[in-house]
Each structure stands twice: as C-alpha cells, then as structure tokens.
Image (cartoon, rainbow, N blue to C red):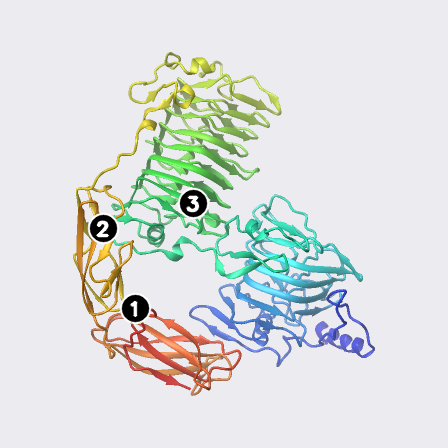
C-alpha cells in the first residue's frame, strides 16, 4: 500500500477516536478533515483542451484536480495555459498539490514541477485543505506543490487550511527555477506548520519574480501563532524581484532586502491609502490596487496595466512617410517593426508631442528585427516613456524608445523623457543597441535608466551620436556589475571605422560598479570623442572617467571638459577626464573645484587614472574655465561659445542656442480622395502636409455626419447609405475626401449550421448539462463586406444570458467555421442562437439567424 493510502487509513482512525485536528484560526470551530483526495479515481475529470491554442479550460474542482493528476504522471504543461473559467470550491476532498508529487502521491525532489501558465482570470479558489503530518510525504504542500519556469497569475486563494511539515505554503510549496513568476495573486487562510523551517504563506521554499501579490494569512506552530514570513526560504539569485506586494503586519513578518521594491506591511485598522502607493510602480499586466472596506488593498482584475501595443492603431504610409499624431500610432510602428518590417528607406514623422504615460512601452525594434528607417521627431517630445517590470524590454534588454537600430537607422530632432527598467543589458532612454552605420543627432533625453549593465542616457550602444544632451539623468546598474555612460556606454565595436560622439552634453548621476564615464563608459574601439562636456556625478568601485573610462584600442579624446565629481571606493584607473589607457587625449580640461574621493579619502586630483609620465590633461580654476583663452585649439566660431549669462559662464555648444524651426505648410492633401464604405464599417484618413515636417494637427469635419462621421484623429465611421464630404482644415489650407456609404444587405451571409461538442470534444446533438463548445458554419457572399458573427446564449425561459463576438478575415465566397466555449457552470444555458451583423455597435443583420437547443 502506498504512503497516500496509509495516510487515508490513519486519518480515518484518528477521526474515529475523536482526535481534534488543528483549526484554521483560534476563533473557529474544529472541522472534519476529508480522508480521500481529489486525485483519487472517480474524483477528477478531464477538462476541455484546445490543442490549437494550447489552452485548458477549468470549470470545476474535478477538472482542476485533473491538472494535479497529470502532473503526478509526468505532465509539466510547459507549453500550455490553464484558464480558470469560474470560481472553484475544493471542499469535500483533500487536495493533492499541482506538481511536486509522483504517481503515488509521494512528495520529493525527483518529481514533476508545474511549468505552464496558470491564469485564474480574477477567480477565487476556496476550500483548499491539505493535511499531512508524515515525514515521508512532508515536502511541497500548497495549491502548487512545486513549480519551475511557470507563471501563476490573476488568482485568489481564500480561506485555505494547510497542515504540513516543511516546504509548505498556501499558493506555492517550492520554486525550483528563478524564471517563474507570480502576478496578481493573493492568499488568505492558515498554515499549520509541523516544522518551522521553509514555511511561508505565498511560497514555502525558494523564490521567483513576485509582482502585485498580497498575503493576509497566519501560520501556527505547535498550537501557537508565529509571526511567520511570506516567503519561507529566500534562496535566490540577484535577478529575482518582489515588487508592489503587501502582507499583514499583525500575523506576518518578512525580512526584506534590495530585491523588495515598493512593498509594505499593513496593520489592522489601517487608514493609509496603500493602494495609491502600490500603484506608483508600473508592472505590465498588473491589476490596479483599490482600498477595501477592511482597510487593506485589494486587486481590481478588471483594470490592468496595458502595453501600448495592446491599443496600437494602424498607420498607412503616404509616399514612404508614416505620419504619427498620437501614441497608438507610434505603438503600431513598434508592432510592425518587431514583426519584421524594418522600415528601411521609410520615415516615421512625429507631428505632435506624445504622452506615453499610463501604459508600458515595447521598444521599436529588436536585435533580430532592428528599426532601419528614419525616426524624425520634428522637434517634438515623447514623454511618460516607461519600460516596466515584466515587459519585453525588461525581460530581454535592448530597452529604450527604440530597442535596436539597424545599419541605416537615423534618429533625430527628438526629445524623450521617461524611465527605463530592465533586468538585462544595453539600455538607454532613446536607444538600446545598434548595428554599425546608425546615426543619432539633435536628441535630448531626461529621466532614468536602471538595468543590469551597459547603459547610457541617450543609448546603451550606438555608432554615431552628435549634438545630443542627457539632461539630469539618473543611471544605475547592478552594484556587482558595471558599464554606464552619460551619453552612451559603448560605441558599436563590430565596425569602428567611423564611430564617434561629438558635441554632446551630460549632467546627472551614475551609480555603477566600474567602466563608467560622464560621456562614454568604455570606448572599446571608438574613433573620436570630441567637443563634449559633462558635469555628471560618478560613483563606483573603479575604472571611472569624467569623460570616458578607457578604450581597448586607440581612441582620440579631444576638446572636452569636466566639472562633476568622482567617488571611487578602490581608485583603480579613475581620473577626471579618463580612467583607462589606449587613449590619445588632446586639449582636455577639468575643474580644480571637482571633488575626487578615493577609498573614502580626498585624493590628489588627476586627469587620467593610469600611470603616465606626463598628464595630458589640464586642471583649471573656475575663473580660468570661463575664459576662452584657456582652451587651446578650441573652435569658438562654429562649435563652442561662452556667455556669462549661460551655463554658469562656462563654455557651451552653439547648437544649444538653436530654436527648433517651425515649418509652415504650403499645401495639404489627404491619403485618399474618395472612399467607399459599407454601413457600420470605418477607415482612417491621414492629413499630409508639404514640405515634410511642416504643419501640425488639422481640424476634421463632415458635411453629413449622419451618413459618415469623423473623429479628431481622422477616423471615419459609416452610418447609412449616402455621400459625405470629409474635410481636414489647417489655417487657410483645406483638403477633402468624398465618402460613399453603401447599405448592407440582409443576405450577404448564410448561416449553414450550428454544431455542438461536449467538454471532452465529443459531438452532441443537444445542449449539454455542463460546459460545451458551439460552432457555427457561415458562408460569405460573393460581394460581401466584413462582418461579425455573434453566438448568444439563453435559458429555458428564453432569457438572454450572454454574447460572444467572433470575426474572421476570409475571401468572398468562402464557407468557414467559428467556435466559442460556454462554461455553463450553473447549467442555465438551454439555447444558442447565431447571428451575422455588420458590427457590435450597429447590429445590422446580414443573414437569417439560426439556433440550436
């Protein structure tokens, strides 16, 4: 007899002699603990599985138990998503954890860990009961016994009662991989620990990335309450993060280190709005926090942080130019570039300032799909840029407004303000990384960059940068890793024949480990760093330069100055102009007022950090620095200027005086002169100004808004048959488009049949008493326009219950099939009807309806 069966027998004997089991809380009555498991034969049930989408839909406790049963028999679910379709009550049987159990129910190291995605979709699991005091079966007790590279999200476990030995919790017993993630999860209930080690409430043993989670639970040990941890044993590496989490101050205690960000312990009878605090740090996919009546924050699963890609709005290029008027359109550029359209030879032109606040940003371009076109900011600003926790840029690196630039990319005349956060390398506010040949000019950035290493204010890695400024930026790397530069960390080293940083300015702070510079971190193979100045405050262990740390090959640094401060805990290779070697330094200066601290002590100021027979740099007093004559060989006619009323009287770059030129348009046209739309459909018109870069935001109007209306962004919606003239106006300029609206016919489509399959995939002729699939076969007419297929459900009295909208882009004359899943947990669905309409908003019928019951 296996250990699980022995446990069942022992529990039965204990109950027979009246043994009182530990209660969930001190003020609750003793309860009767079940003696069999949900994974016993006859208790579990196979759920609906969609092999095409690789999803498993869970509608009952028995179906959830099937997931645990499959894990016991070696299924990891690594490529599947488990979807909880409704709340689940696990009362009635003991729970066998998902993962961490062999086929006999024994827990241990050599068992299968759950590795899929489990999405609770905002639902709750109640009645979770685990009772196991044996030593042989003592490990990995929780809803999930053991997980590896899994994601568990959008799930509440309420009122759990866990009695176990070690490596136990309510949500997860053991985490075996640092790539696992918990997002939007919460637990309440009690853990009755038989051993005080490796016991927590969210996780018993191990840790992973935990975002937006809470624990309002308690732990007992030997009949008394413990002020126990949320995470039982924090065995982890430096990459794990616990962000935007809270736990009860009265029952839980958690030792927090620098992996914990924006986390709080909240006491009973709390009056502080912690929801506002928890919402301060953006996490992609995070549910918004709201304050509950009990004084604790709770999760609003209907309000989650989106990515701008989720609301991307298509843009049609006009003569090779993508005109960008709003954030949704710039997000579309990110979408198509990341899908492989590099936009080489084409231009992305901003016509307005863009505010990206409130949503997470996906960088434009990736290493294997670089942006290779022209990004013309046209003097505009992109603000509110956020690369957040759990986003693509955070997870993969190469984070910035643009992720990766190709050989022909040109980014210019753009201002960027934002906050970049990444767990990887090569990040900057404007650009993450670059191939050779890319160019950046006339860009100004403000904000912060926090990443593992290799970061810059403007770019992580670049090729050519000129006339750019990193203004009051805050750059931070892993304290045990390094690489940062005020403008960029490094210049592309695959082809260094013409790399340079020229006429650039930086201010702010850098906190890193080593290899940092006020302008460039490590000029590995760069050709020139020229005509730059920096006032960055640099703090690190070693290898620090006010302008550049050093180079691996010959590089030239000329006509630069530094007025910031350097703090080096070791002092190796640190100098007020350069830290390392392999540099040819000409006409570079530093302020004698600079603070330079080495190993906690003021150090003799020096221009270079390596041993040289003669320092090629010169220290000047501030009075000397305000005098042109102090700068040998500098061009004060076309590059540099000095003005007592600017930059504190110190030299500045003439391009900084330039005011962005406003180009007035000479003509205005639209992307189309005539458009034909079926009623209920829409399209977007684009206003095109000449010359390129001229103009601004036009005013849109319709002479027949009941026929076709137009939004402030140029989106035209067709309402009824007729003709409307859509006009764009800008000052004295106007352009129009004639929109013809055709009426939709009620026989454009034909519904052929409705078929049903039960949860196991077996075809049935009538509505099943539990979950099922409904499929509708539809024929699209020869001249039909696009349409929406609706599947509506009704109860036995004909009362409407719910609606699913389905769409498919198919050629005319095609017969196709669409399907929808009906959970039917309450068994109310008695009839399904199918409709074809022109759109959910207008609901014009395009086919005769059909039904099945």
Image quarter of the N terminus: bottom right
Q: Nearer the viewer, residue 221 or 672?
A: 672
Q: Is residue 329 left or right of residue 265?
A: left
| Marks 3/1: CA–CA distance | 35 Å
Please, what secondary structure does the residue beneath circle 3 have?
strand
| Marks 2/3: CA–CA distance | 26 Å
Q: Nearer the viewer, residue 678 or 58?
A: 678
Q: Position of residue 266 (x, y in %)?
A: 65, 52
Q: Which label number is shown at residue 228?
A: none
Q: Which label number is shown at residue 384?
A: 3
Q: Position of residue 65 (x, y in %)?
A: 60, 73
Q: Quadrant of residue 661?
A: top left
Q: Position of residue 51 (x, y in %)?
A: 45, 71
Q: Mark 1 — residue?
A: 809
Q: Is residue 203 left or right of residue 327?
A: right
* Residue depicted at 34% across the width and 74% down the height: 789
Camera-side mark, 3 or 1: 3
Q: Nearer the viewer, residue 67 or 318?
A: 318
Please, what secondary structure does the residue beneath circle 1 have?
loop
* Residue depicted at 67% across the width and 66% down the height: 160
Image quarter of the C terminus: bottom left
Please, what secondary structure does the residue beneath circle 2 have?
strand
Q: Position of residue 23 (x, y in %)?
A: 75, 68
Sequence-first tag of 2 and 1:
2
Sequence-first tag of 2 and 3:
3
| Marks 2/1: CA–CA distance | 28 Å
Residue 183 visible in this rendered orientation of the protein:
yes
* Residue depicted at 59% across the width and 63% down the height: 113
Sequence-first tag of 3 and 1:
3
Q: Which label number is shown at residue 687?
A: 2
Camera-side mark, 2 or 1: 2
């Amino acid at each position: 007899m296996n250990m699980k069966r022995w446990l069942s027998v022992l529990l039965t004997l204990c109950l027979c002699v009246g043994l009182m089991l530990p209660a969930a809380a001190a003020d609750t009555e003793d309860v009767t603990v079940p003696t069999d498991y949900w994974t016993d034969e006859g208790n579990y049930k196979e759920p609906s599985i969609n092999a095409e989408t690789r999803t498993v839909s869970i509608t009952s406790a028995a179906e959830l138990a099937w997931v645990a049963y499959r894990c016991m028999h070696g299924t990891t679910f690594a490529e599947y998503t488990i979807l909880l379709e409704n709340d689940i009550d696990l009362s009635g049987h003991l729970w066998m954890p998902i993962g961490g159990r062999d086929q006999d129910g024994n827990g241990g190291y050599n068992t299968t860990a759950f590795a899929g995605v489990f999405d609770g979709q905002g639902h709750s699991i109640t009645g979770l009961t685990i009772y196991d005091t044996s030593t042989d079966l003592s490990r990995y007790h929780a809803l999930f016994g053991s997980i590896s590279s899994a994601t568990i999200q959008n799930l509440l476990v309420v009122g759990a009662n866990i009695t176990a030995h070690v490596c136990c919790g309510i949500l997860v017993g053991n985490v075996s991989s640092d790539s696992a993630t918990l997002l939007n999860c919460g637990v309440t209930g009690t853990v009755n620990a038989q051993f005080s080690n490796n016991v927590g409430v969210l996780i018993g043993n191990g840790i992973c990335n935990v975002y937006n989670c809470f624990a309002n639970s308690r732990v007992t040990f030997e009949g008394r309450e413990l002020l126990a941890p949320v995470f039982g044993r924090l065995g982890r590496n430096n990459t794990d993060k616990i962000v935007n989490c809270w736990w009860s101050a009265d029952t839980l205690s958690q030792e927090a280190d620098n992996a914990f960000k924006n986390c709080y312990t909240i006491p009973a009878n709390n009056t502080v709005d912690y929801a506002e605090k928890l919402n301060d740090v953006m996490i992609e996919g995070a549910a918004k926090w709201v304050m509950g009546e009990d004084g604790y924050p709770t999760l609003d699963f209907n309000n989650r942080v989106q990515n701008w890609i989720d609301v991307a709005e298509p843009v049609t290029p006009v003569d090779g130019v993508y005109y960008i008027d709003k954030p949704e359109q710039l997000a579309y550029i990110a979408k198509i570039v990341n899908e492989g359209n590099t936009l080489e030879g084409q231009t992305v032109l901003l016509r307005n300032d863009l505010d990206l606040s409130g949503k997470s940003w996906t960088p434009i371009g990736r290493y294997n799909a670089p942006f290779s076109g022209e990004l013309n900011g046209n003097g505009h600003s992109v603000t509110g840029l956020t690369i957040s926790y759990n986003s693509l840029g955070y997870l993969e690196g190469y984070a910035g407004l643009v992720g990766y630039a190709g050989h022909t990319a040109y980014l210019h005349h753009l201002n960027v303000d934002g906050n970049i956060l990444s767990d990887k390398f090569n990040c900057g506010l404007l650009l993450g990384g670059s191939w050779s040949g890319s160019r950046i000019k006339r860009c100004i950035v403000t904000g912060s960059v926090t990443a593992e290493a290799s970061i810059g204010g403007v770019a992580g890695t670049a090729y050519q940068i000129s006339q750019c400024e990193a203004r009051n930026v805050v750059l931070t790397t892993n304290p045990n890793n390094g690489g940062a530069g005020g403008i960029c960390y490094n210049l592309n080293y695959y082809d260094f024949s013409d790399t340079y940083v020229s006429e650039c300015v930086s201010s702010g702070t850098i906190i890193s480990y080593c290899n940092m510079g006020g302008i460039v971190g490590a000029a590995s193979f760069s050709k020139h760093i020229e005509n730059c100045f920096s006032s960055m405050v640099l703090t690190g262990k070693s290898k620090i330069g006010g302008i550049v740390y050093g180079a691996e090959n010959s590089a030239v640094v000329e006509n630069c100055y530094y007025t910031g401060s350097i703090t080096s805990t070791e002092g190796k290779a640190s100098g007020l102009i350069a830290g390392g070697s392999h540099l040819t330094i000409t006409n570079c200066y530093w302020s004698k007022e600079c603070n330079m601290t080495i190993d906690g002590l003021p150090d003799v100021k020096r221009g270079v950090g390596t041993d040289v027979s003669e320092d090629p740099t010169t220290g000047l007093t501030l009075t000397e620095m305000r005098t042109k004559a102090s700068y040998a060989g500098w061009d004060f006619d076309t590059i540099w200027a000095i003005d007592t009323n600017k930059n504190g009287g110190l030299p500045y770059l003439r391009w900084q005086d330039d005011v962005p030129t406003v180009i007035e348009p000479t003509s205005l046209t639209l992307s189309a002169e005539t458009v034909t739309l079926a009623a209920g459909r829409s399209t977007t018109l684009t206003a095109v100004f000449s010359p390129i870069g001229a103009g601004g935001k036009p005013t849109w109007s319709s002479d027949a808004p009941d026929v076709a209306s137009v939004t402030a962004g140029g989106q035209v919606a067709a309402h009824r048959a007729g003709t409307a003239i859509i006009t764009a106006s800008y000052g004295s300029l106007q352009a129009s488009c004639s929109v013809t609206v055709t009426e939709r016919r009620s026989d454009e489509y034909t519904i052929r049949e409705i078929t049903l399959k039960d949860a196991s995939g077996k075809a049935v002729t009538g509505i099943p008493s539990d979950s099922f699939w409904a499929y509708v076969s539809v024929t699209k007419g020869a001249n039909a326009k696009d349409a929406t297929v609706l599947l509506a459900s009704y109860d036995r009295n004909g009362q409407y219950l719910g609606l699913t909208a389905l769409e498919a882009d198919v050629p005319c004359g095609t017969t196709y099939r669409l399907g929808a899943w009906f959970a039917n947990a309450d068994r109310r669905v008695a009839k399904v009807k199918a409709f074809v309409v022109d759109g959910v908003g207008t609901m014009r019928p395009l086919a005769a309806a059909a039904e099945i019951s």
